[in-house]
Amino acid sequence: MVLVDLKLQTAQYTSTNQIPFNRPAPVGNEIAYLEDAIRRGHLAGDGSFTHKCNALIAERTGANKALLTHSCTAALEMAALLCDLGPGDEVVMPSFTFVSTANAVVLRGAVPVFVDIDPDSLNVDPSRVAAAMGPRTKAVFAVHYAGFPADMDALAQITVPAGCLLVEDAAQALGSLYKGRPSGSLGDMATFSFHETKNVVSGEGGALTIMRPDLYDRAEIIREKGTNRSRFFRGQVDKYTWVDVGSSYLPSELIAAFLYAQLENLDMITSRRLALFDRYMEAFAPLERAGRLSRTKIPDDTTGNGHIFYLLLRDLEDRTDFITHMRNRGIVTPFHYVPLHDSPAGQRYGRTSGSMDVTQRISQTQVRLPLFHDLGPQIDDVINTALDYFARTA
Ligand SMILES: *Cc1c(COP(=O)(O)O)cnc(C)c1O
């Protein structure tokens, strides 16, 4: 039975010479597994593909348990529930992150306390975290920016004595290492994204990984609408019922089928991206030596996964001119993040601890270059077009 007859080679560019910032690519058995899932006649969550994904994610992250979710946003909401956050509680996190890190906390009525990042790693600065800790701090959410793990040992030295939970927002970090240990097993819990802009994709998708055994049962319950359905399916209870708060955080088997084909190819995906990352690093080294820009810095003790390559330019004007130059030549080079602490919702729901100088500066000078699975030789067009900008504005 052939349900789909798609050319799995990538969609060709329709318009001339446009190089997008990202393009998700099938890499293996996606279509075959989708057909298989459909043939099995089980399309809801927690079927065989979900179980296979859970097992593979646990294996590859070194986590004790992994649960697929429909997004990293959902996994962060689960983590906030598992931290038992409530009104008045505080969670320390970087301001330089995606909104979901903070929303998960705000949805529980708790307060995100934004701190500055380290200028080299762009990850949360442990000394700023230490200074932000107080009697209401219940957790620290550390983001692994660009896939490079935050300094988790330094953070654990702060959270463990304080009795706080340490959560990795590892949305970008599948396959990266800290002191040889994989992201996803570096804190009490971690959250991953399989959104189409990440390394391993299923359109929308995510996972929660857990290290602490005392959180397993409640995680399953929260994910299954507050019921003990997972225990029922394992035969541990003879009927299932509503036992706690929860929501529907599990993806369909169709998502899991697609995702499994991607996860099987994690090493290939990572090495392809690292090759592109290295090519950028090499191409921009002379300009860094000349003091014209800074390249992505690889933090000590980490091995990246080629998720993002960014440049830091002189100032906001330089960055704006660069983006315009690239766009006029058909190349999309976006920036992020607009800092959360001074966004309208960030001001309403959160507060800051300490100065935000690094966050402010990086958010005005950083730009990301296209980096996706089948960018291929077009990386040379990106590099040459960028070098042309720097030659003109030396
Ligand atoms: C992408 C991302 C998210 C959100 O992931 P979704 O799967 O789209 O919900 C959260 N945090 C960070 C740091 C991200 O990069």
Image (cartoon, rainbow, N blue to C red):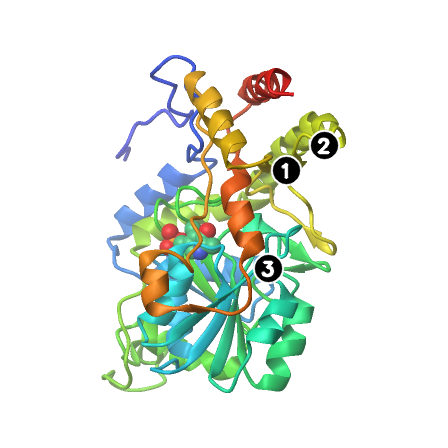
- Look at the image and tell me whether residue 49 can be seen: no
197 and 353: which is toward the camera: 353
| Image quadrant in which you'd find residue 29 | top left
The numbered mark, 3 or 2, whose residue comes first in the sequence reads 3
How packed is label 3: few (under 14 Cα within 10 Å), some, or many (20 or more)?
many
Q: Name the secondary structure under disc 2.
A: loop
Q: Are marks 3 and 2 in contact (CB under 8 Å)?
A: no
The numbered mark, 3 or 1, whose residue comes first in the sequence reads 3
95 left or right of 282 in image = left
| Image quadrant in which you'd find residue 67 | bottom left
Per the image, the residue denoted by label 2 is 291
Q: Nearer the viewer, mark 2 or mark 1?
A: 2
Residue 268, given in percent of the width and then of the height, sits at: 59, 39
Q: Name the secondary structure under disc 1.
A: helix
- Look at the image and tell me whether residue 392 can be seen: yes
Q: Residue at x 33, y 78 (%)?
A: 221
Q: Amino acid at mark 3?
A: Ser
How packed is label 1: few (under 14 Cα within 10 Å), some, or many (20 or more)?
some
Check residue 274 in the rendering and tell me which mark sits there, or answer none: 1
Residue 381, given in percent of the width and then of the height, sits at: 55, 17
Q: Amino acid at mark 2?
A: Gly
Check residue 241 in the rendering and tell me which mark sits there, or answer none: none
Question: What is the count of numbered marks?
Answer: 3
The numbered mark, 2 or 1, whose residue comes first in the sequence reads 1
Residue 3, given in percent of the width and then of the height, sits at: 26, 35
Per the image, the residue denoted by label 3 is 183
Q: Nearer the viewer, mark 3 or mark 2?
A: 2
Whole-Å distance between the Cαs marked 3 and 1? 17 Å
